[in-house]
Image (cartoon, rainbow, N blue to C red):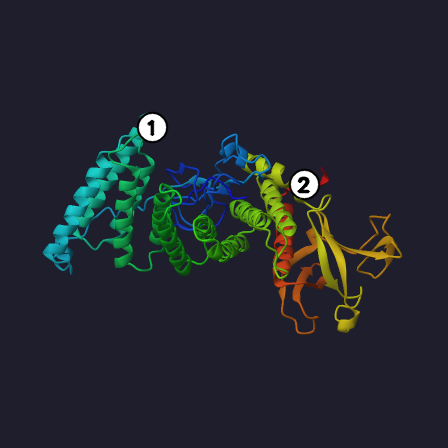
Amino acid sequence: MPETTEESELHNGHQPQAEPEPEPESKAESQPESKTEPGTENKPEEALKVEPVVTGADPNTKEEDKESSIQSNDAAKPSSTDQNARPQLRKDEGNRTFTMRELLTEFKSDEEEAGSPYSRESTQRQSNQNSAAMELVSSVTGADEEGQSRQRVLVYAAKRYAAALEKKPEDYDALYNWALVLQESADNVSPDSTSPSKDDLLEEACKKYNDATRLCPTLHDAFYNWAIAISDRAKMRGRTKEAEELWEEATKNYEKAVQLNWNSPQALNNWGLALQELSAIVSAREKQKIVKTAISKFRAAIRLQFDFHRAIYNLGTVLYALAEDSVQTGTTNPKEMSSNELYSQSAIYIAAAHALKPNYSVYSSALKLVHSMLPLPHLKDGYLTAPPVGNTFPPHSDWKRTEFFLNQEALQQVIKVEQKQVSRSLSGRIVDAGNMDKKTIRVYIPDIISVSASADLTLPPGAGLCINTTSGQVFLVADSWESLDGWLDALRLVYTIYARRKTDVLAGIIAT
């Protein structure tokens, strides 16, 4: 279930740490995160919508949400299509934020210019390129009065950057900012315009980003926004070989942006969206590997920012799409999660995104599609190997694989004895399941301090899980590392929802 609106944020060097809020002069669009440094969402295809990418803002800033509706295969295809096809989730791309760096008020002196390593030929070539770019920007007419006013500001900014480059061709800040102007102008092109076209402006912006990063290879904002511009060009080409090449180029630039600025959830989210788009074009043999890589990027984004609802939702859509592929191909691998497990995992992330952003229609629509896939009245259930109560590190033979479930209140162990369901508390008492309050020992969500994978060598074989609480540590073992990832994410998400005071929303989701 892919999300459908993809957009990227353009980064300008600022790296806020709160939720992504639109940067000054921001622009909303439904696309994967585009012009900004890593840190926002993308646009999905006709299926579960994908959170879009943001452009023109810092990858580490949070952006405003833009709705992307959930669409179904039936809606996207002629009436003659198979009526049994599952609806798909659209990617949620979010808003595009645009913020240019302030150009230094004083340009370089003539003496500095004289010492420039650029030859006259190089300077002349740069001047010709500047003229072509200036002509493109100047010929853009906005679709409405607001767009026209916006374009006048962009033309003025372009003239300043052109003047700066005339004085010093190696001014990578001016090149970077001019690329942003071109990218923003592309978004300002009226839908029916053919001269200049949006693609012409984006192509010119890519050239400026290339020049800027050649002069300053550590300019991570430029790599991020460059990737967004390439992604926008790829979207115009459908599922063609040229589009595939552009998506591959975009993923490489997102990778470079993350290498230079690893602490950017937006860049990771956009990277995941680009990989998700690429997976829809490549051969079936390559697809699964690319999808798994996309999952890892979304998960990494969430672990940098637990309440990053766009990445949470996008992870849900890619898992949904993976489940759909599994059903359609009919392939099963004992080492892989089943389609039912994938659907259930997908529903967990979409439910969490909705709980964090309950008024966002994209998430509400997607939740209606996957709600029945949750293990109601719980958010998650499954098996974990646990030690006897009261003995944290007993002999391995004393650990038992038992059922657990997670809801908005706690992680709880369930034990069945003589066909009578009972719960075991941390104190070791076993109580009749009819008494829910005394039933199992629960790890209450408000008591959790941290959750992490554990490499403690005293644990039984498997994927160790450590839950650090106000009452001490609780050690459990998951069946596999993939299963452990699901438990870790679920626990972190439920705690984040509690910390954001949205527990009542989650309770409403799993109670219905």
Q: Position of residue 278 (x, y in %)?
A: 43, 50
Q: Nearer the viewer, residue 342 or 215?
A: 342
Q: Is residue 405 left or right of residue 92?
A: right
What separation in Å lies between label 1 and label 2 (alpha carbons)? 44 Å
Outermost residue toward the top in this view: 145
Q: Residue furthest front?
A: 80
At 59% from the left edge and 49% from the top edge, which residue is drawn? 323
Q: What residue type is disc 1 on? A: Glu
Query: Residue 73: where, in percent of width, then height?
Result: 53, 37
Q: Residue furthest right?
A: 418
Q: Nearer the viewer, mark 1 or mark 2?
A: 2
User: Badges 1 and 2: C-beta atoms under 8 Å apart?
Assistant: no
Query: According to the image, label 1 marks what residue?
Result: 146
- Report if residue 71 is visible in the image: no
Would you name the residue on which mark 2 appears? 372
Q: Could you say whether the residue bearing mark 1 is in a helix, strand or loop?
A: helix
Residue at 34 percent across and 48 percent down: it is 242
